[in-house]
């Protein structure tokens, strides 16, 4: 690994690339799973279908979540490759991606939490725990973005993209 900012920039690029691949995989999963579950449900009697609430929760926002994750994944791959190449656009792209990750989490919060609420069985305490955990993770995301941007906005990092 390179020393100084160059090594950290490369590490950031690798992380962004991994995030892009994971977002694309999650988007594909969210697009395919509701379809597979519906096909499976066809083999069950409608009256004996214990998976119905969970399937409905998974399908409720799967299109939006899948789309958001695929778009975010593509943007992350472009930004990550640009960062590895020290392309001029990459510094701004990674900055926008950081802030966009917060907006993305807000956009997919309901469809992401809906299956967890179903799995909680309607218990108020379990629902509150799921919601509290989600809020903690959301706040951690904001903290991680702010912490990373402290590094990313340094002059020596910006200079690496000014060729």
Image (tube, grey):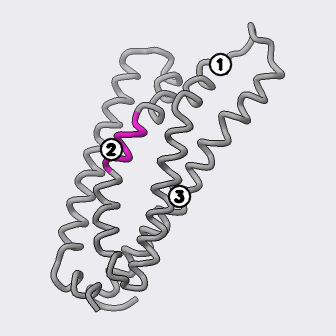
Residue drawn at the location 62% of the way across and 46% of the way down: 29
Q: Quadrant of residue 163?
A: bottom left
Residue at numbered disc 3: 22
Secondary structure of the residue carrying tag 1 is helix
Residue at numbered disc 1: 52
Q: Quadrant of residue 105?
A: top left
Mark drawn on residue 27:
none
Pinpoint residue 51: horizontal percent, then vertical percent: 67, 21
Above or below residue 112? Residue 53 is above
**Alpha carbons under labels 3 and 1: distance apart:** 28 Å
Secondary structure of the residue carrying tag 3 is helix
**Alpha carbons under labels 1 and 2: distance apart:** 28 Å
- Disc nearer the start of the sequence (3/1): 3
Q: Which quadrant, please, contains the N terminus?
A: bottom left
Pinpoint residue 43: horizontal percent, then vertical percent: 83, 22
Crowd class of label 1 (few under 14; some 14 to 19; many from 20; radius 10 Å): some
Residue drawn at the location 74% of the way across and 7% of the way down: 47
Viewer-side residue, 1 vs 97? 97
Pinpoint residue 130: horizontal percent, then vertical percent: 39, 30
Residue at numbered disc 2: 137
**Alpha carbons under labels 2 and 3: distance apart:** 18 Å
Residue drawn at the location 25% of the way across and 45% of the way down: 139
Pinpoint residue 54: horizontal percent, then vertical percent: 59, 24
- Disc nearer the start of the sequence (1/2): 1
Q: Residue furthest top?
A: 47
Residue drawn at the location 39% of the way across and 81% of the way down: 10
Please report contact status of discs 3 and 1: CB closer than 8 Å, yes or no: no
Secondary structure of the residue carrying tag 2 is helix
Instruction: Give the magenta-colored segment's residue range.
Output: 102-109
Main secondary structure along the magenta-highlighted residues:
helix
Crowd class of label 2 (few under 14; some 14 to 19; many from 20; radius 10 Å): few
């Amino acid at each position: 690994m390179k020393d100084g900012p160059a090594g950290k920039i490369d590490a950031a690029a690798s992380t962004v690339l991994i995030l892009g691949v994971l977002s694309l995989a999650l988007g594909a999963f969210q697009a395919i799973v509701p379809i597979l579950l519906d096909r499976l449900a066809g083999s069950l009697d409608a009256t004996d279908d214990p998976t119905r609430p969970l399937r409905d929760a998974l399908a409720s926002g799967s299109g939006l979540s899948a789309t958001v994750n695929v778009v975010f994944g593509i943007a992350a791959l472009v930004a990550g490759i640009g960062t590895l190449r020290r392309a001029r656009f990459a510094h701004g792209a990674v900055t926008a991606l950081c802030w966009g990750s917060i907006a993305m989490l807000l956009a997919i919060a309901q469809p992401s939490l809906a299956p967890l609420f179903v799995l909680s069985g309607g218990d108020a305490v379990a629902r509150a725990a799921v919601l509290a955990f989600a809020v903690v993770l959301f706040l951690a995301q904001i903290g991680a973005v702010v912490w990373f941007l402290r590094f990313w906005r340094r002059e020596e990092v910006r200079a690496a993209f000014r060729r």
